[in-house]
Image: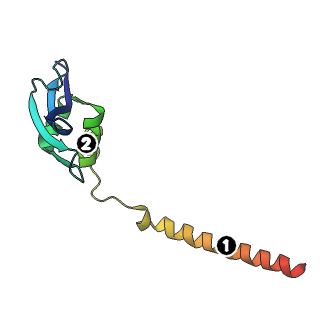
Amino acid sequence: MAVRIRLQRLGRKKRPFYRLVAADARAQRDGVFLERLGHYDPITDPADVVIDEEKALKWLRRGAQPTDTAKRLLSQQGIWKKFTYEKLGKPLPDEEITADETPEDEDISASENDQEELLAEETSQSSEEE
């Protein structure tokens, strides 16, 4: 049985509310599902996304394929990244290093400043010669 992690539409007309469910791929969109994993409310600002991480990982480990939208929601919550690292057998990095914190950026900005100063000196020397 092929299992998909997908959204099940609920709510009234023009006011959608979705459940994230694990369901048989042959079942209807709003039909029978195997387990409820969470919910998604796109109407609120910002959108409300609640996913049970353990349940989602359980189904991903069993081979359930998420739809594109479900995969996007799992990525936003960090569950998809955790699953891919687990699948590759690599440890999940504890802290993300941002571009602002890297020491290489300091060296690059310093060398850019030096280049700008050299260009300014060259242009001033060439204008003096004329």
In front here: 84 or 78? 78
Could you tell me which quadrant the C terminus lies in? bottom right
Q: Nearer the viewer, mark 2 or mark 1?
A: 2
In front here: 114 or 13? 13
Could you tell me which quadrant the N terminus lies in? top left
Mark 1 lies on residue: 116
In front here: 116 or 8? 8
Mark 2 lies on residue: 73
What residue lies at 84% left-to-right and 76% top-to-bottom?
126
As helix, strand or loop, the secondary structure at mark 1 comes to helix
Farthest residue to the right: give it. Answer: 130
**Is there a contact, CB below 8 Å, between mark 2 and mark 1?**
no
Q: Which mark is residue 14?
A: none
| Position above or below: 128 against 112 | below
Write down the quadrant of residue 41 in the picture.
top left
Disc 2 marks which amino acid?
A: Leu
Disc 1 marks which amino acid?
A: Glu
Residue 111: x %, y % from top left? 61, 70
Write down the quadrant of residue 123 in the picture.
bottom right
Looking at the image, residue 46 sits to the left or right of residue 24; the answer is right
Crowding at mark 1 (Cα within 10 Å: few <14, some 14-19, many 20+): few
Q: Is residue 91 visible?
A: no
As helix, strand or loop, the secondary structure at mark 2 comes to helix
Residue 125: x %, y % from top left? 82, 79
In front here: 94 or 117? 117
Distance of label 2 from label 1 (alpha carbons): 45 Å
Looking at the image, residue 104 sits to the left or right of residue 63; the answer is right
